[in-house]
Structure formats: C-alpha cells, structure tokens
Image (spheres, rainbow, N blue to C red):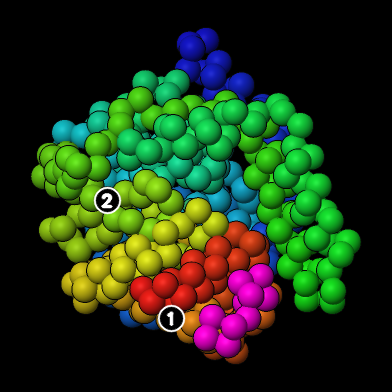
Amino acid sequence: MGERMKMENITRRGFIAGASCMGAAAAFLKYLPLPALADSLAQGTRVAASPLVDKGFASVRKIGEGVYATISDPSKGLATLCNGGFIAGKDGALLIEGFASPAGAAFQTEALRMVSQAPVRAALDTHYHFDHSFGNAYYGVNGFPLWAHARVAPLMVQRYATIQGKDKSAVIGPLQKKIDSAANDVEKQRADGNLKAMNMLLQSVDQTLVTLPNHSLDPAKLPMKVDLGGIEAVIETYPGHTPGDIIVRVPAQNIVFTGDLLFNGSYPVTFDADMLGYRDTASKFAAFDKDTIFVPGHGQVCGQEGVALERAIFDDLAEHAKKMAAAGVTVEDAQKRYTVPEKFSKLGIFAWSFCIDSAVAQFYNAAKAGTL
Ligand SMILES: [Zn+2]
C-alpha cells in the first residue's frame, strides 16, 4: 500500500469520527437548504442539466469548457460545506478550495480525475476560513502545490493552529452566559445559534490536521494569469470577507469563482470582514459582464441576480445601522434591533453573531464617522 492510500485511510477514518461529532454540533445547518438553480441558468446551454457526480453533501457540474463547479448542500452532509470547483486545460488543472475536510478535497479531486488526467498545477484556498481550508491535508499528501493569499497561512496559524487542543471555555463561557441572560425568545434563539456555530467550528479545529498553504500569493503581484493549456485562469484579490480573499476568473468564458466575497441565498458571514470593502467589491462584481456565471462561496451557482441580492442585503444592514446611529441608539442595541425584512425571510443565516453583529457595528461606526 502506497503512502497515498495510507493517508486516504487515515483521513477517511478521522473524518468519520469527526463528522459524527461535528454532525451533532451542526444539526442546525439542516435549515440551510440549497435553492434550485435560477431559471435563466437552468434553461441556458452553459450549465449542464445533470451533474457529473452527486454525493448529496456536494455535486459537481460542468459550467463551461473545462470548467466545473462543486456546489455544497450542507443539509445533506458536511464533507465540503463550501463551494469550489476546478479548471482543467490540456497542460494542467487548478483545484479551487480546500473545503471543510480531507474527504471534501478527495471528492473534488476524484471528480477532476473523471474528466482530466492533466497534472494539478495547484490547489487554491480562496481565504483562510475552516470550511475552505480544513481539507488541505488531502492535497498536501498528494503533492499538490497549495496556493493562497499571503495572509491565509498566518491567519490559519493564529486562529486555528494555536487553539488546537486548548481549553475553549474562555470562548464558550460568555456565549453560554448570553443564552442564560437573554431578555426574550428572539435573543435566546440568536444566542443559541451563535453557540452552536462556535461549537461546530471549535470541534472542527480540534479534529483537523491544519495544513498551511506552501505557496503564498503576494497581493501586490496580483492579478496573475495561469495558462493551463487552452484555458487561461486569472487570480485576483478583492477586499471584504476576510483580511485576504482571492477570486479566480476564466475571462474568456465569463466565469468567476468568488469564494465568500459572494454568498447566494444567505446572509454573508461578516465576523472578520471589512464591510465597506465588501460592499465595494459587490459593486465591482455588479459591473462584470451581464452574462457572467458566478460560483459563490455558498449557495447555488448564479448570475448577476445573486450579486444584486447580496448588494440589497448590504444596503439593508447599512440603512438600519445609519438609522440607529442617527437616533443615538447604542451599537449593542443597534445589533439587537436588526430584524430580517420580509423580502429576505427565505435567506439563511449561519449564525447571528457571525453574520449580523459585525456588519451592523461597522456600518454604524462608518455612519458616525460620516464615511457610509
Ligand atoms: Zn468564509
């Protein structure tokens, strides 16, 4: 048995143990179902009607010549959690995202091998978040170069590696207290969701062989063209979701893999975002070609309507924060008083503190400073 097989067994075993544990903590994700493909895309000729492979937790679908999207459905399993995809040319292939577990990265690699034997030029994490990077070990053990924005490796060390195996009560304690001291059912529900999301993240940290990218992309040297043989991919950086986000474009086919700079069908996760940058990036996406196919970080493949929805969410959060700031309400109360408008009632929220609090606080502060 080769090294590779051994590692596959190890990661598979580790994942099964991890998945059952994480499964209990992540039961709430069942309420984030994956919406259907928009009619405009489903009826077009670019997105394949049936997937190349569908494992429930994710499916892989052809969205262009040599371009495939991996779309997760967390209500059916947790191996991938985020979306990704791959681009395969004559001379090389680029795998996008490390996913939430080695099993997720293995799934995507096996899908690539169903359509191409081209050598893997790189596997790339769009940003450091666990659901985009915790499967990196699978790529590493297969000898694939691991690319990411230069901020990704230091952030993975700081936010994940350093807390592995450590006592987490300093994080969990205050979240538990917020549940106990909630003033009403709405606050209690939100606090409960925050604790569940944090538990899932922390359990995942403890169960993962954190594997850092070994090839940093210097943002000053982006955009960068990658010639895969008959297909050119372009790696670009935009501000917003985390301190280091990149996107992958296939300009000749108007296809963009956005990472979490775009969420489709749910509120964006903003706890370590730069909200003004995030909003600005969404307006730049809106200026991309009207026939662009976007592969968002989460949710279904979309066109410009997905970008418009994200912009509308940002507008709503910003409007609320501005009103609260003008009324002299404290920032804590501004966060508590945000309510999801009827038009967004079908959207998912991963957790209140991960999606709403920081967004409201940053827009509130910007409004006070006159920069909103
Ligand atoms: Zn993210």
Specify few, some or many for label 1: CA neighbours under 10 Å numbering under 14, 14-19, or 20 or more: some
Whether residue 200 is situated above or below residue 123 in the rendered picture: below
- Amino acid type of the residue tagged 2 in the rendering: Thr
| Tally of numbered tags | 2
Determine whether, in the image, residue 200 is placed left or right of residue 275: right
* Mark linked to residue 237: 2
Q: Which residue is mark 1?
A: 315
On whether residue 280 falls in the magenta region, the answer is: no
Q: Is residue 207 visible?
A: no
Question: Measured from the top left, where is residue 222 in percent x and y?
Answer: 19, 44
* Residue shown at the point (51%, 60%) measured from the top left: 270
| Res. 146 image quadrant | top left
Which residue: 58% across, 87% down? Answer: 327
Question: Does label 2 point to a residue whose CB lies under 8 Å from ligand 1?
Answer: no
Mark 1: which amino acid? Asp
Q: Quadrant of residue 353?
A: bottom right
Q: Is residue 166 visible?
A: yes
Judge: label 1 CB < 8 Å from ligand 1.
no
Could you say where residue 217 lies in the image, as x and y percent from the top left?
Answer: 27, 36
Q: Main secondary structure of the magenta part?
A: helix
Secondary structure beneath dot 2 equals strand
| 351 or 23, nearer to the observer | 351
Magenta residue span: 325-335
Q: How many angstroms separate mark 1 from mark 2 (CA)?
A: 23 Å
Q: Mark 2 Cα within 10 Å, few/some/many (few <14, many 20+)?
A: many
Q: Is residue 330 magenta?
A: yes
Rendered location of residue 340, percent (x, y): 61, 81
